[in-house]
Every structure is written in C-alpha cells, then in structure tokens.
Amino acid sequence: MSTARYDVVGIGNAIVDVIARAEEDFLLGHGMHKGGMQLIDEPRAEAIYAAMGPAVEISGGSAANTIVGVASFGARAAFVGRVKADGLGRAFAHDIRAAGVGFTTPFAADGPSTGRCYILVTPDGERTMNTYLGAAQHLAPDDVDADLIAASTITYLEGYLWDPRNAKEAFRRAAALAHAAGRSVALSLSDAFCVDRWRDEFRELVRGGTVDVLFANEAELKSLYQTADFATAAAALREEARLAVVTRSERGCVVINSGGLEAVEAFPVERLVDTTGAGDLFAAGFLVGLARGAAHATAARLGALAAAEVIGHLGARPETSLKALAAQHGLG
Amino acid sequence: MSTARYDVVGIGNAIVDVIARAEEDFLLGHGMHKGGMQLIDEPRAEAIYAAMGPAVEISGGSAANTIVGVASFGARAAFVGRVKADGLGRAFAHDIRAAGVGFTTPFAADGPSTGRCYILVTPDGERTMNTYLGAAQHLAPDDVDADLIAASTITYLEGYLWDPRNAKEAFRRAAALAHAAGRSVALSLSDAFCVDRWRDEFRELVRGGTVDVLFANEAELKSLYQTADFATAAAALREEARLAVVTRSERGCVVINSGGLEAVEAFPVERLVDTTGAGDLFAAGFLVGLARGAAHATAARLGALAAAEVIGHLGARPETSLKALAAQHGLG
C-alpha cells in the first residue's frame, strides 16, 4: 500500500443550505417532521421557499460539511459530489475549495439546478430539513476517481447517497476501490428517516464488511434495529460492526467495537444556536483521529470538540480553525 | 395630504452580501482600505472571490437593510431597487418580501448579474467592503413609482445611489415627488469614500433643502466638511441641515438641529461579531421614531437598539424582532 495522498475523501450529495428561523407552528402548518430530513420535489421546494422567512445561503451537504471539518483540523481532505454551474453551484465549489479541500467533480452540464436544503431553525436550536437534491442526483459511478480513492486513508460516505439511484452505485464502486487498495470505508447513517428507507441495505453494508466504521446518532441506531431501547440497539450493533460511534447529543458518545462499549463525554457548549452539522462535524474529528492512529477515545474527543464549535453558530461548517481549537484543548 | 400607506420607502442599490472572515494581511495584500467600501468591476470581483475564504450569502444593500429594520419594528415599509432574475436576485427579492417589505421593482431583463458586495470581516469585527454594482446600476427614474413615494411618510435614500448615473436621477425624482406630496426626504451619507467622491453635491442637497434628515457617521461628517475636528464639523452641519444625526459607534450619537446638539447613548453590546449594518440599522430605528412622531432622543434610542442587535451577529439584517426588542426596553 502506497503512502496516502489524502487522509479522508468524502462522497456525498453536494447541497447548499438555505437557512431561516421559524416557529414550531410553521413546521406544523407545512407538515414537516421536526428534527428530520425530508426529500422534496421542485414544486414543494418552491412552495416552502416562498413561505419561509428571510434566509442565509451557506454551503452544506452532510459529507461535505464533514470534509471541510477534516480540512479545518489541518488534515488532507478531498470531496466528490455534483453541482450545476449556476449561482449556488459556483458558491458550493468556491466554498469547499476555499476551505482547503480538493474538489474536482465537473459541474453538471444540464438537468436540474444545484441541490439545496431548506433548513428551518426553531427557537430551541433544532433544525428541520427539506432537501431538493437537484444536480446531486446525477452523481454517477464514473465520478468516483479510482486513483483518488486508492490514495485516501479513509473513504467517507453519507447514508443520504442511498437516495439517488446513481449515487448508490457510486457509493458501491468507491467502497470496492477503497478495499481493493487496502484502505478503510466509513459510513454515516445520516438521518433516522433515511435509515427507515434503507434499513436492510444499511445493515447488510455493516454486516458484510462493506463498511469498516459506522457513525450513527441515537435515533438512527434505534431505527436501524427497530427498538426504543438504547442498550438493546447498542448490543445488536456490537454484534455486527467492526467499529461504530453512536453520538448522544449533550450526553457525549459511545464507541463500540469488539472490545466493548466506551463512553466519551461531550464538550460543554456556551450557547446553542443551531444544531445543524453537529453529527457531520463529530465525524470530522473522529475521522481525523482515526487517520492519525489516535486512540478511539481521543478521536471521539476531537469529534466532540468539532461538534461543540459548529452548534455555537448558524451553519454547518466551522467558523474557527479546528486545528487551533484542538491545540488549545491539548488535542493537537 | 392623504393618509400615508407606508411609514418609510427606501431607494438603494440592491445588493447581496458575500461575507467571509479574513485576516488583516488579506486586506493589505489586495490593496483594500480597511473599514471602507470600494467599487469594483467584474474582473476584480472574480479575483477577490477566488482568493477569499468560504463565504455566506445574505441579502444586503445599505438602504435595503434599513428598510428591513423598519419592517422588523412593525412599521410599514417598501423598497425600490434593481436585481436580475438570477440566483442572487431571486434570493434578494425573496428575503426582502419575507421580511414584510413591499418590493415590486421588476427584475432587470438583461445586462449584468445581480450586484454583490464582498465583505471581509477581520477578527476585530470590522468589515471591509468591495461592491460590484451589477444590475443595481440599471435602477432608473422610471422605477420610482410616484404613487408609492406620495403615499410614504418618509422617502429614505442612500448616498451610494450617487455612484450609478441613472440611480442619481432616480434619487432626484424621488425627492421631488416626496416634497410635492408634502412628505419628508432622508439621506444617509453611506461611507466616507462615497462622501469624498460626491462632497459638493451632497452638501448642496442638504443646504438646498432636497434632504430634510441627514444620517452620517463621524468619518463621513469629517469628510463632508474636510476637517479632523468633530466639533467644527458638527457646527458646520448645524448651519446647513434641518435635522441630522451623527453616529459615533460605542459613544452613541448626536442629534443636530436648529435647537442645538443633543447626545444620546449607545446600547451596550455583549459580543461584537460584525459591524456590518450598524449604520443602516441605526437609521431604521431613528426613522421609525420620526414616522411615529417620537422625540428625537427616543428615535435615537430606537436606532441605537437596532444597531446593537445587528452587530451581535454576522450579516446586516436583524435576526430577532426589533418590535419585541423595543417593547422589552420600554421603547415599544
């Protein structure tokens, strides 16, 4: 196995977040599941946008946020995902490159416009997401550059890739290429509703060894094993996964592997503004730790640190250098 | 004079802000005047964007920010300004309407894309602006709806309108229509460099009575009268203006009229994040007070309150209801 050129390459739906504050009534009135991610078509996207309040546009996308976090830690990062050459697509490409991430997926020449996620942030800081995938649906197996995957220590995939048909094939190809090169594959389950759509396939990915490292939050884990009991779900996951991390918001996380379960604390948060990106940034820190060969508990602390930073402001990408923040906390 | 349909109608350059954090070195390396606003052409806009960090897109424009602030206070507000029907233009139109502002200026059918301002926020919270006017340059006298102006208690204009040739004519037409209907005209000087470009014309607008209410910050006032001494400049302004308010950052403001000078305190700010919009939002509060017939000192407190809100977060438009905030502070 040759020396890695990247620590982590991420593959995901390339999305721009359109974020507005909203009251609980707005979610109810528009039939939204609070805290979840719903896929929407273009007419519904237009209707939600017309009804929602003044918004801020910030590049997002789950795996893309993670990869920007990886770069912010000073690790070498690349991203694969599809946007169109419209205003939002150019902003997405600018922002991810400006964050120091290698991004070379060509713009989609035709078809729908750049994907976007209408995110409504309620006064409690919770976010409710409505995603119009747009050009992200056109991510295809050919977009997965074999050399890039082979040259990356970890290939990181988001569960949301299971929604667009072609992206699923791109995911499978990337995992096969990574393993053929002796590299690792990590997956985030993304969202409890996404797990509900693809439960059997996700379990098979973990059980069959397509995925070496699994990220889930508590709701996703419970959805995966269809139980309301955390201990039951965690025990089932331990049977099937090589390495998994389950995040539990302010209760920190649990690292699960054949050695058992290890709980790691969260970082205190001064002011919770917007939970968007908490899971994405946790994954960033953990992946950086893994790529550096750190102990799992240390990797989990890096994850917790990054998550704490991102929920202190609007938007799902870090506003401060995670490398500097880690150094301040003796995790550099 | 018939009953007003709007408290304030604003006319200004319709701009989307593209905001990124930057170090002082970046400003130096790109020949930018810290704290100022520079007009740039399209190639320079492209070059700055390519070099700057990951950005957030938020609707802006000086008078547009003010008008959104006016609406946030619960007053009736309208805006006139030109964007193109591209991604940024649609976002601008959405955001200002979603804020409760009447906005009916048609999209520019051709010509340059929607205007944008590349704003670099340094670690001290100061903002340095680079504006590509784009479609905003095509605001023309015909865009000024005579009925709208006649039906608004105050017509509010930004000094930046003096930069695009047609916009200047639109400004003159709006002021004439307002006065013909027995209404008031207010002007913000916008920026010390803008004053430097148009000093004589701005002084003539004030002296000749085209402008009834003048907003300036300390730097703009000193530039207007080409003196480094505040007292000298304030005395000169008192000779020429009917009513003027000079903002002095954390030192509050001074209201100037024939009765003399009255100092009004600033509101304390918990955490200074980004000064973008401080002057715009001060004007919003003051105009709301004026439209309600409040005492000048009360109007100035409303202005100070709105300015304090907007500098506590990124972006130049309020994130909380100014009406509720004013009520909390006994200014409702």
Image (cartoon, coloured by chain):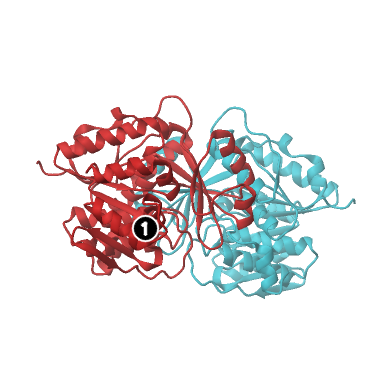
Chain colours: A cyan, B red
Front residue of this view, candidates B63 and B327? B63
Q: How crowded is mark 1: few (under 14 residues within 10 Å), some or many (20 or more)?
A: some
Name the side, left or right, on which B180 lies relative to A186.
Answer: left
Tag 1 residue: A24
- B193 and A211: which one is in front? B193
Q: In which quarter of the image is residue A47?
A: top left
Spot occupied by residue A238 in the image (x, y as percentages of width and height):
71, 66
Image coords of residue B230 (percent x, y): 37, 61
SS of the residue under disc 1: helix
The reply, left or right, for residue A50 in relation to residue A134 is left
Q: Quadrant of the C terminus of chain A?
A: bottom right
Query: What x and y, as percent, mark residue A169?
Result: 70, 39
Residue toward you, A182 or A10: A10
- x 37%, y 56%: residue: B217
Asked where in the image residue B285 lies, by quadrant, the reply is bottom left
Residue at 52% over, 43% down: A116
Q: Where is residue A150 in the image (x, y as percent from the top left)?
A: 82, 46
In this picture, residue B293 sits left or right of residue A82:
left
Tell me if residue B148 can be seen. no
Q: Which residue is drawn at 64% across and 55% down?
A: B25
| Residue at screen point 69% across, 74% down | A262
